[in-house]
Image (tube, grey):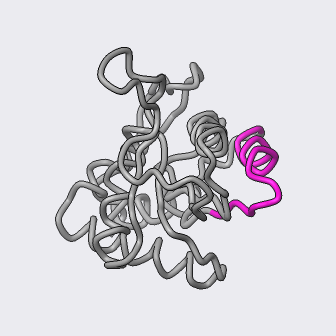
Amino acid sequence: MLAHKSFRLGEFKLSSGGVSDYYIDCRTTTLDARGAQLVGQVFLDAMRAQGWHADAIGGLTMGADPIVVAVAVISGTLHGFLVRKAEKQHGTGQRIEGFREKGARVVIVDDVCTTGSSTVQAIQAARDFGFEVVGAMCLVEREEAQGRPNVEKAAAPAPFISIFTAGDVRKEHLAANRA
């Protein structure tokens, strides 16, 4: 589904400032009814396979939002939270929205990891709030030189995993277009 709905070839400017010959817009998959179910299940299965016993799942808005909701709904037990890019300047001024129980064990998620900056921001905000980060994961890792090392360093001692790599998605996209 990612290869069909979310992968595009061309010339694209990335949020990291770089330029790429492909773009992966995971939201076209994660916001699809069936895509959300599949993403929720694959993330939940991966968390269980890692032995991560979490209370909640969250990440930096907006890429993580549909993943957080899908996993929470599929699990029936995990709570969700979202991390704002900055604290609200009105109301309660919170940076963490949704589940807010200090000391809770959490998994940080993201849709695409290029430099890892979104995931790193979410990890730092979660720890600053008082969560215990037990793992970090992304739907697609772009396999850029600094991405994985940045996230692994920020998440340590918690592990970082990806469900797919950009190479996996590209390969499937090209194979489907040949057929």
* Residue at (63% x, 76% y) in the render: 52
* Residue at (51% x, 47% y) in the render: 112
178 lies left or right of 52: left
Q: Quadrant of the C terminus?
A: bottom left
The answer to whether residue 91 is above or below residue 52 is above
On the image, the x and y values in percent for residue 13 come to 48, 22
Q: Please report the bounds of the magenta region as a residue range.
A: 146-161
On the image, the x and y values in percent for residue 130 come to 63, 47
The answer to whether residue 41 is above or below residue 31 is below
157 lies left or right of 80: right
Please identify the quarter of the rendering in which residue 2 is found.
Answer: bottom left
On the image, the x and y values in percent for residue 64 come to 42, 48
On the image, the x and y values in percent for residue 127 come to 66, 45
* Residue at (75% x, 61% y) in the render: 158
Callout count:
0
Foreground residue among 16 and 171: 16
Foreground residue among 92 and 179: 92
User: Which residue is situated farthest in the top direction here?
Assistant: 89
The answer to whether residue 16 is above or below residue 69 is above
135 lies left or right of 70: right
Membership of 83 in magenta stretch: no
